[in-house]
Amino acid sequence: MALLTLTALPGEAQQELFDLWLQTSDVLLLREDARPLMWQPNPTRAQGCIRQTDAEALGGQRHPDWTLISDQQWATLVADQHPQLTW
């Protein structure tokens, strides 16, 4: 299981790469400038998540494809997932 932390909105080339690389057992975490993706369906087959504090900072409403995680769950996710990639 891999963790991809997405920090910016992906372009077409990045999306094609994610389609090839990400599996259903992987996790896609939205951070920084990628957080507005929470209003849209998850564009990958990976499990999508966003920190609850990040979602609340943007009004709290999100598409149901994105799971809210606590800061503790985020720390555990980062500690347990390998490989990790920040994009």
Image: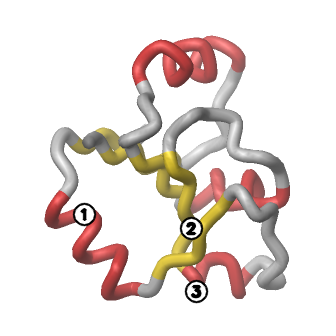
Q: Residue at label 2? A: 50
Q: Position of residue 6 (x, y in %)?
A: 50, 46
**Marks 1 and 3: in contact by CB < 8 Å?**
no
Mark 3 secondary-structure assignment: helix
Q: Is residue 71 above or below residue 26?
A: below
Q: Is residue 64 above or below residue 75?
A: above
* Amino acid under disc 2: Ile
Q: Residue at label 3? A: 53
Q: Which quarter of the rendered picture does the N terminus lie within?
A: top left
Q: Earlier in the sequence, mark 3 or mark 1?
A: 3
Q: Residue at label 1? A: 78
| Residue at position x 62%, y 12% in the image | 13
Q: Quadrant of residue 30?
A: bottom right
| Residue at position x 60%, y 13% in the image | 16
User: In this orientation, which residue lies closer to the viewer: 24 or 68?
Assistant: 24
Q: Is residue 17 above or below residue 23?
A: above
* Cα distance between the residues tagged 2 and 1: 13 Å
